[in-house]
Amino acid sequence: MDENIERLIIRIKELEHELRDKLAGKQEAFLYRLDRGTVHFEEEVRKRHKKLIKRLRSYISEASLLNILTVPLIWGCLPPALLMDFTATIYQIVCFPVYGIPRVRRRQYIIIDRHALGYLNIIEKINCLYCGYFNGLISYIQEIAARTEQYWCPIKHARRLNSIHNRYKYFFDYGDGEEYRRKLEEVRRAFDDIAAEQERKGEGH
């Protein structure tokens, strides 16, 4: 791998860890703690949150009519999303052991926790649950697809991408046929970083 690219990747990783640390620091600022994935607010904070709940009548009456009319279309995306979730999960359960690819841990991508916020009314809680599921699902499926791509077609694109997944750094340069033929099997097995990250987090296998 090009040394400049490798340095950039290392810097990106450092910034990601720094961002996670900054976000974790918000727990102290907003007086909550995480215990085995469950959010716990202090009693004083819970009381303040209850005072901030917007009543359903006000929430609905103040909503834009166009927003209300789009609700069936938004929720119409849920059935295909559930099917995609099921299909992608079954796919990796069956195929990843065959390819020697480590499984993607679904719970690391689909995070449902905003329903614990006491200042949200029931509609807002449902909306947040839906958004957390849908966006987490997209990240989860992208990671499954990225690991699959690393195995079957680890070649960079000639054109610039708007978004680059985290496996792209292992891909061969576009047009470098010699390196592709020489190191394809090596790249197909280059998932040691995932095992190391899981070990660092104490997750095991």
Image (cartoon, grey):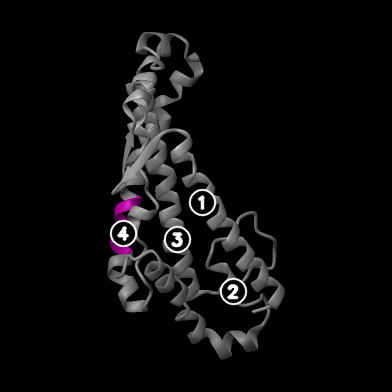
Q: Amino acid at mark 3?
A: Glu
From this view, report whether residue 131 is shown above or below residue 16.
above
Dot label at residue 145? none
> Real-space Cα distance between discs 2 and 1?
33 Å
Of the residues under marks 2 and 3, which one precedes in the sequence? Answer: 3
> Real-space Cα distance between discs 4 and 2?
25 Å
Q: Are marks 4 and 2 in contact (CB under 8 Å)?
A: no
Q: Are marks 3 and 4 in contact (CB under 8 Å)?
A: no
Q: Which residues are magenta?
A: 84-91
Q: Secondary structure at mark 3?
A: helix
Of the residues under marks 2 and 1, which one precedes in the sequence? Answer: 1
Of the residues under marks 3 and 4, which one precedes in the sequence? Answer: 4
From this view, report whether residue 28 is shown above or below residue 96.
above
**Label 1 crowding class (10 Å Cα cut-off): few <14, some 14-19, many 20+?**
few
Residue under label 2: 155
Identify the residue at horizontal 66%, vertical 76% (top origin).
173
Residue under label 4: 89
Residue under label 3: 143
Residue under label 1: 21
User: Looking at this view, is 111 or 33 the one in front?
Assistant: 33
Q: Can you give x and y, in whole percent of width and height, for residue 127 in the image?
A: 39, 30
Identify the residue at horizontal 42%, vertical 56% (top origin).
141
User: Looking at this view, is 19 or 149 the one in front?
Assistant: 19
Q: Nearer the viewer, mark 3 or mark 4?
A: 3
Q: Can you give x and y, in whole percent of width and height, for residue 73 in the image?
A: 42, 30
**Label 3 crowding class (10 Å Cα cut-off): few <14, some 14-19, many 20+?**
many
Q: Amino acid at mark 1?
A: Asp
Of the residues under marks 4 and 2, which one precedes in the sequence? Answer: 4
Q: In which quarter of the view is residue 118 placed?
A: top left
Of the residues under marks 4 and 1, which one precedes in the sequence? Answer: 1
